[in-house]
Image: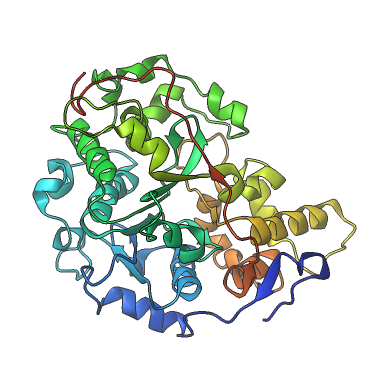
Amino acid sequence: MAFEIEAAFKDELRYVEARDTRSEEEILASIREPQVSADTSEKNIWAFWHSGLDSMPGWTQRNVVGWARLCGPSWTVRVLDTVPGSPNNALKYIPAELLPETFVKGTMTGVYVGPHSADFLRGALLYLYGGVFMDVGNILVRNMDDMCWNILSDPQNPRQVSVPWMYSTTMANHFVAARKNDPFIKRWHDLFIHLWKGRDTYEGMSANPLVSYILKKDLSESAGRGFGWQFKIEPLVIFEYVMQVVSWDRLCALEDAGDGFSCADYARDNILWFDALEEDWAAETVAGFTGQSVFDALATRLDADPNSERYKMAHAMTWRILTKSSMQKVSRGKNLTKTPALGLLWDLPENQGKDFEKGTFAELLRYGSVHFEQTRPEIAAVQTKKPKVTMRKGVFEP
């Protein structure tokens, strides 16, 4: 179904054709059997699903198809896996020595094997090949070139990396864009893999003296910025779960320790940070930080009573995403929050297809994410500062 841009948003949006006009199955087939070498161009969109593209939940497959339609043929979408013999097996792209033994041998335990496997690949792929690594839960709304790549690829611009900014020097790793061979990305990956050396689980990682400062951290900065998730686990468990984010945070406090490279300076001067709350979690800022509230809004029918509170919420949320967001990050967050995240709700058998159900705001979001191009010239960039306390230490120096 085709939609029109409402009059109230005609200054903020314009209609465009899909940049990739292939069918959904044709796009998926091209991802299953990649025809273009990753060395050909840095314009790779990387993702990971342990058991392969065809076993991904339908809503995440539609996300990935949307990436291709929005970004067009100059970008190659790649979904890596750990399936033996697969053309997309991660070890065909990354030398085993760049990855922790627990990934190479398949010995990792716990409920977060998938997310942490993606974490292992993220830095390595970006360093080796360049491009963007995204979680399959991202519904992309702004094409990659307009979002950040035109800046990163500009030889006159010092920005070489782009990430969502949460607070201070804390990033969110569901989206990381970087040029090939970036020195900060290399150190980030090396530190994270170092922390996993000899481990099969993330539990207890805070004991490592390189990151033991998180023992004193809480979620007050996150809450103060407006992130309102209600977690059912202790802050320390969350920080251990997002150890790749913690690794980034540590790097941002490291001055030149003798190798001629200051991570702290680089993070301030060479990374394009953008506001994660504004660009990636707009649905939550309107509908609230529970999966059910966003689910209900997107499931609202377009022909419902426009004066009802539910319709008003759905309308405000969907058009807010389409006009002012780069993406909507849909979390699964298994066992993290008190109530199920949107991704877990869409995973349920009874909710199959709810992410694009005909006649709902979900269908409008899917259509608009490809066909409604934003007129705003740039995303909500943030200029970070160095931490108040920095360290003149090497990457692996406690």
Location of residue 344 with respect to 90 vertically, above or below:
above
- Residue 158 % position (x, y): 38, 49
Q: Is residue 28 left or right of residue 288?
A: left
Residue 116 can be seen in this image: yes
**Residue at the farthest right position:** 307
- Residue 108 % position (x, y): 21, 41
- Where's the N terminus, which quadrant? bottom right
Quarter residue 386 falls in: top left
Q: Is residue 382 left or right of residue 265?
A: right
Residue 348 can be seen in this image: no
Residue at 60 percent across and 60 percent down: it is: 377
**Residue at the farthest left position:** 97
Location of residue 242 with respect to 182 vertically, above or below:
above
Q: Which of the pair 295/63 is nearer the observer? A: 63
Q: Which of the pair 125/41 is nearer the observer? A: 41
Quarter residue 112 falls in: top left
Q: Is residue 171 left or right of residue 118?
A: right
Q: How many marks?
A: 0
Quarter residue 169 falls in: top left
- Where's the C terminus, which quadrant? top left
- Residue 99 % position (x, y): 16, 46
Residue at 58 percent across and 64 percent down: it is: 355
**Residue at the farthest front position:** 156
Q: Which of the pair 178/53 is nearer the observer? A: 178
- Residue 316 % position (x, y): 76, 55
